[in-house]
Image: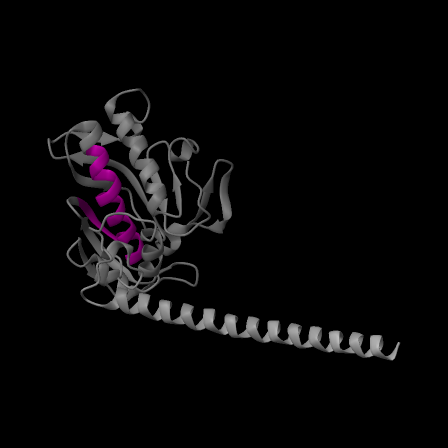
Amino acid sequence: MRHAKRQQMAQQAAEKQRKKGERSGAVINGLAVFFVAVLLAFAGYQGMVNPDTPLPREWNPTQPLRISDPVTLLTGWKLNRAVASEDQCLATLDGFAALQPLAPLADTEQCFIRDRVDLRAVGQARLNPVETRCAIALRLAMWERHSVQPAADKFLGSSVSSIDHIGSYNCRVMRTANGPSKRMSTHATADAIDIAGFGLSDGSRIRLLADWEGQGAEAAFLRAVRDGACDWFNLTLSPDYNRLHADHFHLQSRGWGLCR
């Protein structure tokens, strides 16, 4: 009996030692994996910031947005970073827009323009001078480059020479199908712009009020650029939304992702 008890105690001690060894091994393995992950992350970061990195800049999260870069899964994230900083927004637009930075406007507590610019062109497309936010200008530039011009080439065989707007800043409440709202419009802070149509390089013009309906190339173009705007603006409203938008796109820099 005593021999069996001593044997049992020895087995229990051996089992405890084995489990202790397993725990120590797991801790060591975990630390090894952690340090390898840190080394790989460091190596990856060094690879991204290295001037000779083979990683294309459009896929490189350490490289800021460039309007001419191909669109990737990182483009939207880079755009949001750019519009969050006035300096970065202006730097991104340099060479891709005709604009003049202006001092902030403060009409009232509810009506103001931060990162205010006087905008006159984005990419190849002219605009009548409009005071708006840099964020709107940058989103317009991305839309013009990656949505408007490709759609014009595809459906119309021409390029867009002008984007016709009906304003950005307007100190007013929101309009609804049931009348004025108590909420201020995003136009009151120039966080939106209304687009009424486009001029083409061949001299023709496309207007939402006249060309939205139908099965022709003009209607197909307008629907394509509406859908494209949803990639670059946080809220896009078109004639499909309600009768108040029968003659324009409402393109908004902030919102909840509605595209209609």
Q: Is residue 138 magenta?
A: yes
**Quadrant (top left/top right/bottom left/bottom right) for the C terminus:** top left
Position above or below: 245 against 54: above
Position above or below: 239 against 53: above
Position above or below: 39 against 118: below
Name which residue lies at 36% across and 62% down: 107
Name which residue lies at 25% across and 67% down: 49
Q: Name the residue at the right extreme.
A: 1
Q: Is residue 128 magenta?
A: yes
Residue 75 point in image, percent of width and height: 31, 52
Q: Is residue 165 left or right of residue 77?
A: left
Q: Nearer the viewer, residue 110 or 40?
A: 40
Q: Nearer the viewer, residue 200 or 38?
A: 38
Q: Is residue 220 left or right of residue 188?
A: left
Q: Nearer the viewer, residue 50 or 203?
A: 50
Q: Main secondary structure of the magenta part?
A: helix
Q: Is residue 166 left or right of residue 37?
A: left
Magenta segment range?
Answer: 126-152
Residue 191 point in image, percent of width and height: 36, 53
**Image quadrant assignment for residue 44:** bottom left
Asked if residue 230 can be seen in this view, the reply is yes
Residue 84 point in image, percent of width and height: 35, 62
**Quadrant (top left/top right/bottom left/bottom right) for the N terminus:** bottom right
Asked if residue 171 can be seen in this view, the reply is no
**Image quadrant assignment for residue 153:** top left
